[in-house]
Image: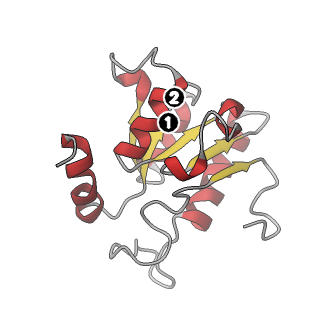
Amino acid sequence: MGTLSSELASHAERLSPRPRIYADANVPAGLVVHMRTRLHWDVLFVLEEEGLRRAPDLKHYRLAQQLRRTLVTMDRDYLDDRRFPPDEGGGVLVIHAPDERELLALLDRIDRTLFSRSEGNGEDAGDGAGLSGLPLAGRKLQVHTDWGREGDW
């Protein structure tokens, strides 16, 4: 028997077809709002959780994996495979853009590419098929403003 979060995480994935995101403290609040309202992602934002606000990066990395969420950050420290072994994570998405407008456009491309929608009807696949869930499990992806425009994925 595991922890409460590890036991419930797989059930949460089945109950909601939406991408499950763990946004660390480096993600601007405006991006979190965009993820939730426009992209309809299920986002745990550490700045909204008193006990997580000042937690070390390693705790965020492990907690994201335990909760079966993709860690979204602007912190390049997570790219260090020695400190954050990819096979021990639920996936890390490190995003970069010069301003918030470009970050929002980048998130839209990430949504279309990583968290695919059913073709034709614009709805979530919802059945666990395709790339929904944890498309980066055991991997890391660093994306920038040009990513996704020329078939980078």
Quarter of the figure with residue 101: top right
92 on left or right of 120:
right
Pick whichever, 74 or 102, lies toward us.
74
> Which quarter of the image is occupied by the C terminus?
bottom right
Which residue was labeled with disc 2? 58
Q: Measuring from the top left, give residue 150's x and y in whole percent.
A: 83, 68
The alpha-carbon separation of the residues under discs 2 and 1 comes to: 5 Å
98 shown above or below 143: above
Q: Is residue 104 left or right of residue 132?
A: right
Residue 58 % position (x, y): 51, 28
Q: Secondary structure at mark 1?
A: helix
Residue tagged by mark 1?
Answer: 61
- Label 2 crowd bin: few (<14), some (14–19), many (20+), radius 10 Å: few
Q: Is residue 151 left or right of residue 137?
A: right
What kind of residue is marked 1? Tyr
Contact? badges 2 and 1 (CB < 8 Å): yes
- Count of numbered marks: 2
Identified at 49% across, 36% down, the residue is 61
62 relative to 111 in the view: left or right: left
